[in-house]
Amino acid sequence: MSHIGKGNAGYDANASKRRVDITLNEDLLRLAEGYTDNLSDTIESLLAAWMQDERQKSDNDLEHRRKVAAAWNAFDEKHGRFADEWNSDFMPEDESR
C-alpha cells in the first residue's frame, strides 16, 4: 500500500522507522494479517489517510469559521450591530459605536 499523497502528505514519508508498542484486538489482527503481507505498511498508510482526513476536517472547520466571521462583519457594516439598541442603555453617553 502506498502513502496517500506522498508529495503532499504533510509528513516525511521517507523518515526512518521507529518501533512502537500498540495493543490491538487479537482476532482483528489475525484477520487483517490474512489480507496483507506487510501489516506495518498497511497500518502506516491507513494512519496517514486518517491524519489527512482529520487535517482536512480541521481546515474546513477553520474556513467555515472565517466565512461566518466575514458574514457577521458584513452584516455589521451594512446594518450595524444587531444588539446595539439594547446595549445603548449600558454604554457611556460619549461612546459611539
Image: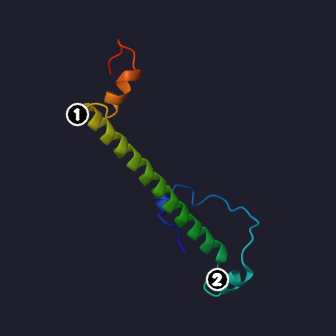
Image coordinates of residue 65 in percent, x first then y, are 41, 46
Q: Residues within 10 Å of mark 2 (few under 14, many from 20)?
A: some
Image quadrant occupied by the N terminus? bottom right
Q: Nearer the viewer, residue 9 or 56?
A: 56
Q: Is residue 30 above or below residue 63?
A: below
Q: Is residue 72 above or below residue 85?
A: below
Asked whether, in this view, residue 19 is left or right of residue 52, the answer is right
Q: Is residue 36 above or below residue 8?
A: below
- Marks 1/2: CA–CA distance: 59 Å
Q: Which residue is mark 2?
A: 32
Image coordinates of residue 71 in percent, x first then y, are 30, 42
Q: Amino acid at mark 2?
A: Ala
Helix, strand or loop status at disc 2: helix
Image quadrant occupied by the C terminus? top left
Q: Which residue is mark 1?
A: 78
Helix, strand or loop status at disc 1: helix
| Label 1 or label 2, whichever comes before in sequence order | 2
Q: Residue at x 61, y 68 (%)?
A: 44
